[in-house]
Image (tube, helix red, strand yellow):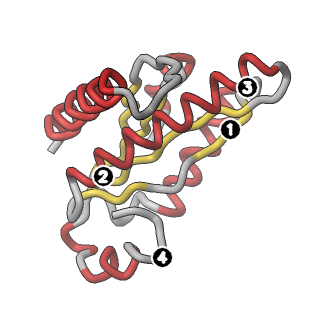
Amino acid sequence: MKWEADDLPKYFEAKEYIDTVLVPLIPIQLSNEADSLKLANYQKTLQIIAREAERDFAGRMLLSPVYTYVQAASYQKEQERINQWIQLLFKEDFKHVFFLTFDVKWKKEEKGLDGTLLWLPGTVIENYQSVLTKKWINEQTSQLNELIKSFW
């Protein structure tokens, strides 16, 4: 289920069965065009993968709104903010909190997160409709799903 008006009534009906939340971590910056475009591309790709994972685990997982942060910010401070956010919103209702990101810098901070970091290697996608892109997204989603299942 997603954090959307259509899904939230279903979430509240089945709340006792939904024990996992997936939080996409998306960096943002506008200091230069090339990096901004790359991050915007990563955001779209990460959201596609997160939605596919949510669809595969409908009834067991809630896809959180994206947590957006400034890429140049202190990751330690962002970690504190994320943990506070998780405590306020999700900690009481979920056994499993997963953070999904392409940002490798989170690997240094993952021990301090109130959840499990799932890092995927990012790739810039130019054509989301190509057969190769769809195959890559399916492979990433499949591997992500297997990893999530290993925590249950």
Answer few, some or many: residues within 10 Å of disc 3's Cα (few below 14, many 20 plus, some between 14 and 19): some
Circle 1 — which element?
Answer: strand
Circle 4 — which element?
Answer: loop
Q: Is residue 134 above or below residue 6?
A: above
Between 147 and 48, the one lying in front of the other is: 48
Q: CA distance from mark 2 to mark 3?
A: 27 Å
Residue type at the position of mark 4: Ala
Q: Is residue 122 above or below residue 8?
A: above
In the image, 148: left or right of 48? Answer: left
Q: CA distance from mark 3 to mark 4?
A: 30 Å
Circle on res. 69: 1
Residue type at the position of mark 3: Ser
Q: Which of marks 2 and 4 precedes in the sequence?
A: 4
Q: Is residue 46 above or below residue 57?
A: above
Which dot, 3 or 1, sits closer to the camera?
3
Tell me the residue that label 4 is attached to: 5
Tell me the residue that label 3 is attached to: 36
Between 59 and 134, the one lying in front of the other is: 134
Q: CA distance from mark 3 to mark 1?
A: 13 Å
Q: Which of marks 2 and 1 precedes in the sequence?
A: 2
Residue type at the position of mark 2: Glu
